Each structure stands twice: as C-alpha cells, then as structure tokens.
Image (spheres, rainbow, N blue to C red):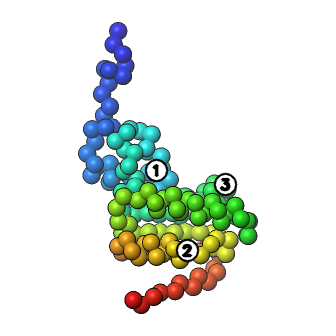
Amino acid sequence: MMDPKQSCPNVLSKVPNNVIDEILMCLPFRDAVCTIILSKEWRKHWCRLPQLTLDFNFWKHKKDIQYLTGDKRATSNFTMAIHNIITRRLGPITKFTLCIQYWKSYPPIDNLLYFLSRNRIQLLFLDFRDNSNCHLHFSHV
C-alpha cells in the first residue's frame, strides 16, 4: 500500500503567488496570518500583504488587548502586537486600518504613523470608538 503523503502531492505549494496574495487579501488579517500552517510556501505571504487591517476582529480576544484603562499589560500587548506585525513586513503598506475601542488605554501611535509615512502609505484609516480625541502632529519637512 502506498504512503498517503506520497500519493497526494501538496497542491497548496503549487498555487501561484498572485493567487495566494488575492486569497489572503480577502481574509481578515488574523486569519491570513494563520495560513502559515498550510504550506511552507505560504509562510511569508502574509508579510507581503499591501493592506493591513487591525480592526475589532483582530483585537477580539481579551488577552490580545485588555480593556481596562491604564492596564500596563494592555499597553504592552498592543505595542508588541503592532511591533511584531510591522517588523515582519516585506513590502510597502498601501492601506492601513487601525480600530481601537478604548483609545485612552493605549500608547501614542506616533512611531507607527512615522513608520507608515516612510513606507509609502497611500490610505490611512483610524477608528477610535470611545469618542476620545486623538491629536496627530504632522511635520512639514
């Protein structure tokens, strides 16, 4: 009897890169990252996605972001999550969406905005649901 691994070729490894990219862009970001388990060929594809959406679905687990105002762990989790995503990038980010429910609990996003401005961002969408004011400082260099 033939070994099942030998009789069934890894079809996912043969999917063209542009098709993989299109599939991943249709998925929520969290799910796109999870596709790394499908095939070795898919491991770096999420890193090339030109559109990043970190919305309420991304922060859906309490352990991802603590909703307690002033919780140091919330700030740390938020900062670490953003840092891990941004530092693994392999290409430009053309569209970036950030949605946070309790804005005052999180650190300033100045460094994130600076990074995006230096990496050819074309569209930036910020959504802070707690109706707090976010003051953005723009430099005219």
Extreme bottom residue here? Answer: 140
Residue 55 percent across, percent down from the top left: 53, 64
Which circle, 3 or 2, is nearer the viewer?
2
Location of residue 105 (image quadrant): bottom right
| Distance Cα–Cα, label 3 vs label 1 | 18 Å
Where, quadrant-wise, is the C terminus in this rendering?
bottom left
Location of residue 77 (image quadrant): bottom right
Residue 22 percent across, percent down from the top left: 32, 54
Left or right of 68? Residue 132 is left
Where, quadrant-wise, is the N terminus in this rendering?
top left
Residue 26 in sight: no
Residue holding disc 1: 33
Which of the two discs, 3 and 2, labels the residue nearer the N terminus? 3
Name the residue rendered at 30%, 34% in the picture: 11
Residue type highlighted by circle 2: Ile
Name the residue rendered at 37%, 71% in the picture: 119
Element marked by disc 1: helix
Which of the two discs, 2 and 1, labels the residue nearer the N terminus? 1
Residue 89 in sight: yes
Residue holding disc 2: 109
Name the residue rendered at 60%, 63% in the picture: 78
Q: As rendered, which of 82 and 17 lies closer to the eye?
A: 82
Residue type highlighted by circle 3: Lys
Left or right of 71? Residue 110 is left
Which circle, 2 or 1, is nearer the viewer?
2
| Distance Cα–Cα, label 2 vs label 1 | 23 Å
Residue holding disc 3: 63
Q: Is residue 76 above or below residue 4?
A: below
Name the residue rendered at 44%, 63% in the picture: 52
Residue type highlighted by circle 1: Val
| Distance Cα–Cα, label 3 vs label 2 | 20 Å
